[in-house]
Amino acid sequence: MCLRPSTFHKSSERGVLDTVAPKTITVSSPPSHILLKKRFHYASEIAAGTKQAAIPRAVPGKDISFYLPKVAALLECCEESFFRSRKLTDVFDAVANGNVRKLLMYIREFLTSLHLDTGKIIERIPDGYRIPEHEAVRALLYGDFLHFDPENSPFVNLFDISRADRREHFTRFLALHFLNRVSTNFGYSDVDELMQYLCQIGFTDEHVRGTVKALDEKQCCEYLLPSHDMGVTNSQIRCTNLGKYHITHMAPLFQYMDAITIDTPVIDAAVRHKIQDVMTIRERLDRCTLFIDYLNECSESIQDGDAVELWKETYQAVQADISRIRSSI
């Protein structure tokens, strides 16, 4: 029987499996860029008619039409884009967390997202167009919604709060940073060490438990034994690929900060009234600048110099990204 490690541990603890003498064989997943290249190549051959396969039937209408040569061209563009751009592939590696089945599911969601302008891509293919990283990030951030929805997006709002405490904006952000840099056992750290670190900064035990639970549910961190819960002595936890991607790639991006601006409760009434639902890029840049300035002001309430410095680095990176976008429009 072939099982994932998490399934094996969970089943053995529940008594489903006889684990007197288990034999473990590790089968690594194939490199994503090669896997996707072959998948897209196979699909483009079907669309071009060079390979026979049954195509699912659908009723063409105003929202869907069939023109397989264009489909083949789009899939060929995807094939080259994912094979040539490691940054593009890294987006899907992060949200899939090493699960190839989820990787293919998110690729499907990306290709069918209303935020992906396939018409623009097809028009620019003759010029050697390659799908950029930000197209994938946007499609996965929003899905089929106009605004960011943390319940349906694979990404989490790092700066969400549950109480009117300015410091709580940074609990998830600092928790992932701690797990990413402190590890003692194959990337795992003691849960007690994480709780001690966050409590020393000033967060309550209850809030820390809720924060780690939320990150675990969004697969930004994981326990060594999945059935372990907070409070288990010497339980181990680590930051997943998705969690690392949040703090190293997503948080410094204007695109991410812009998406979570509407979803994040703002305690300062003066700032809250200025944050409106806007659509143009210039208005969104202004709104995002207002939002990160607000977070920067909130960071002054954190009684830990290293924690504040972690945020300052992200704050400066977002500022630089905003300046870059302003200069290009």
Image (cartoon, rainbow, N blue to C red):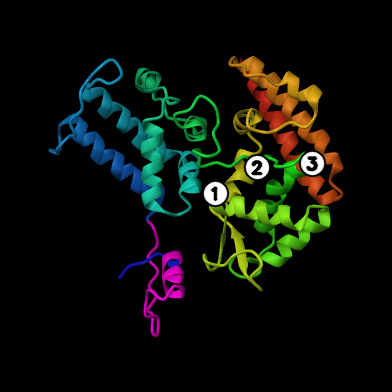
Marks 3 and 2 sit apart, C-alpha to C-alpha, by 15 Å
* Foreground tag (3 vs 2): 3
Name the N-terminal-most of marks 1 and 2: 2
**Which amino acid, mark 3?**
Asp
Residue located 84% across and 46% down the image: 302
In the rendered image of this protein, does residue 91 appear above or below residue 231?
A: above
Count of numbered marks? 3
Whether residue 327 appears in this view of the structure is: no
As drawn, the label of residue 218 is 1
Q: Main secondary structure of the magenta part?
A: loop
Residue 155 point in image, percent of width and height:
55, 41
Q: Are marks 1 and 2 in contact (CB under 8 Å)?
A: no
The answer, for residue 77, to whether it is visible in the render is yes
- The answer for how far apart the CA atoms under marks 1 and 2 are is 11 Å
Mark seen at residue 165? 3
The amino acid type, in three-letter code, at marker 2 is: Leu
Judging depth in this view, the residue of 11 and 47 nearest the camera is: 11
Q: Is residue 10 magenta?
A: yes
Q: Please give the residue where the numbered disc 2 appears in the rendered image.
A: 158
Residue span colored magenta: 6-29
Q: Nearer the viewer, mark 1 or mark 3?
A: 3
Relative to 147, residue 215 above or below? below
Quarter of the image with the N terminus in it: bottom left
Between disc 1 and disc 3, whose residue precedes?
3
Expressed as whole percent of the image width and height from the top left, the position of residue 32 reads 40, 49
Q: Quadrant where the C terminus lies?
A: top right
Determine the secondary structure under disc 2: loop
**Crowd rating for badge 2 (residues with CA inside 10 Å; few <14, some 14–19, many 20+):** many
